[in-house]
Image (tube, helix red, strand yellow):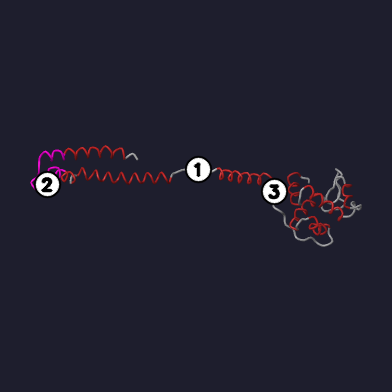
Amino acid sequence: MRRNGVILPAAIVAAIAVGGVSAAAWLMGPSASGASGAAAGLESITNTKTVALLQQEHQQAIVMSNASRTLTVVAKAKVATPSSAVASANQSSSSSSSSSTGTAAEPTAAAPDPGTAQSIAYNMLASFGFSTSQFGCLQDIWQRESGWSYDAENPSGAYGIPQSLPASKMASAGSDYLTNPATQIKWGLGYIKDVYGSPCAAWNFELANNYY
């Protein structure tokens, strides 16, 4: 854009020079070839180096002006729309929530051996609306809490496989809650569903708080 300031004065000077020569030629009258003095003066000016340079400068100015407009368009800043800002904020918030909760990946586990307490729990999952993919989480919770032992007792008074506190809570699942793993598991799965919604949600809580 700066070169336009140079070309404009140069163009004015050239115009004045052409006008002056034309006027002088007019006063001098017809030339020997029969053409008017003005026409001859214009012809001589056109062939001068000054006009050639001015024409070259003029072409360069046009090229630079076009280039400036092109660069301006390319460098135009992108303006964020409200919808894109909200989407970006939501994405950032979602990423922060995932990282801050410390959610663990669901552990995987094969079907347990028949006749074990784990097998009883595995077969009961569907009756509580849980898929077998939740068994890995359940196995980890009760392994940590009681080692899957029906008579595991904590100094706090928690008892059995699900570590019910107090143990008498499990009576709602059966009167044999002190000795029957199936009764304890039935109560424990109901507790997990009511409080956490799923074994894996309970496991994530256990990891964060060391109890469930």
User: In this orientation, which residue lies closer to the viewer: 71 or 24?
Assistant: 24
Question: Which secondary structure lies at badge 2?
Answer: loop
Residue 170 location in percent, x, y? 87, 49
Is 184 above or below relative to 9?
Answer: below
- Which of discs 2 and 1 lies nearer the camera? The answer is 2
Category of crowding for the residue at label 2, using alpha-carbon neighbours closer than 10 angstroms: few (below 14), some (14–19), many (at least 20): few
Instruction: Write down the region rendered in magenta.
Output: 21-41
Mark 2 vs mark 1: which is more N-terminal? Answer: 2
Q: Relative to 83, is 179 on the left or the right? A: right
The span from disc 2 to disc 1 (Cα, nearest Å) is: 63 Å
The span from disc 2 to disc 3 (Cα, nearest Å) is: 97 Å
Q: Which residue is mark 3?
A: 103
Q: Callout 2, which amino acid?
A: Ala
All told, the count of numbered labels is 3
Q: Is residue 154 magenta?
A: no
For the stretch drawn in magenta, what is the main secondary structure?
Answer: helix
Q: Callout 3, which amino acid?
A: Thr
Q: Callout 1, which amino acid?
A: Val
Q: Which mark is residue 35?
A: 2
Q: Residue at x 56, y 45 (%)?
A: 83
User: In this orientation, which residue lies closer to the viewer: 62 or 141?
Assistant: 62
Residue 160 location in percent, x, y? 86, 50
In the displayed orientation, state which residue is furthest to the right: 175
Q: Which residue is mark 1?
A: 79
Mark 2 vs mark 3: which is more N-terminal? Answer: 2
Q: Are marks 2 and 3 in contact (CB under 8 Å)?
A: no
